[in-house]
Image: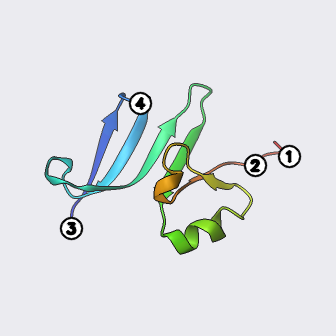
């Protein structure tokens, strides 16, 4: 098993983490999106059973564009924001 990291600007500034080589079907398991306001958003895959449990926690939301694949995103809750 090999972990690879790629940078892409196709859908914004992000780092994509995969197990295996993308050229031969490596599976993406997490990504970090770098937002224009300086925030970094970590999202990753989970299994269907854990997905619903995890999104009930503060600071965990369904990942934009990937929630249908059971991905979650971590947010920072700071001073009630």
Query: Secondary structure under badge 2?
Result: loop
Q: Which residue: 74% across, 59% down?
A: 58
Location of mark 2 (residue): 77
- Sequence-first tag of 3 and 2: 3
Residue drawn 44% across the image and 29% down it: 12
Percent of width and height locating residue 56: 71, 64
- Residue 30's place in the image compared with 79, above or below, is below
Badge 2 crowding class, 10 Å Cα cut-off, few under 14, some 14 to 19, many 20 or more, is few
Mark 3–mark 2 CB contact (< 8 Å): no
Give the residue furthest to the bottom: 49
Q: Is residue 64 left or right of residue 69?
A: right
CA separation, marks 3 and 1? 41 Å
Q: Residue furthest left?
A: 24
Residue bearing the label numbered 3: 1
- Label 4 sits on residue: 11
User: Do the residues bearing badges 1 and 2 touch, measured as CB atoms within 8 Å?
Assistant: yes
78 vs 34, left or right, is: right
Decide: few, some or many residues near mark 1? Use Cα within 10 Å; few <14, some 14-19, many ≥20: few
Instruction: Indicate the secondary structure of the residue bearing disc 1.
Output: loop
| Residues at marks 2 and 4, CA–CA distance in whole angstroms | 25 Å
Which of labels 4 and 1 is toward the front? 4
Which numbered disc, 3 or 4, marks the residue closer to the eye? Answer: 4
Quarter of the figure that contains the N terminus: bottom left
Circle 3 Cα neighbour tier, 10 Å, few/some/many (<14 / 14–19 / ≥20): few
The residue where tag 1 is placed is 80
Quadrant of the rendering where the C terminus is positioned: top right
Residues at discs 4 and 1 in contact (Cβ within 8 Å): no
Q: Secondary structure at mark 3?
A: loop
């Amino acid at each position: 098993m090999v972990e690879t990291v790629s940078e892409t600007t196709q859908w914004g500034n992000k780092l994509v983490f995969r197990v295996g080589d993308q050229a031969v079907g490596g599976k993406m398991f997490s990504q970090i999106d770098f937002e224009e306001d300086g925030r970094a958003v970590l999202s990753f895959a989970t299994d269907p059973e854990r997905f619903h449990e995890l999104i009930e926690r503060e600071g965990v939301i369904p990942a934009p564009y990937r929630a249908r694949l059971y991905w979650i995103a971590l947010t920072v809750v700071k001073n009630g924001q």
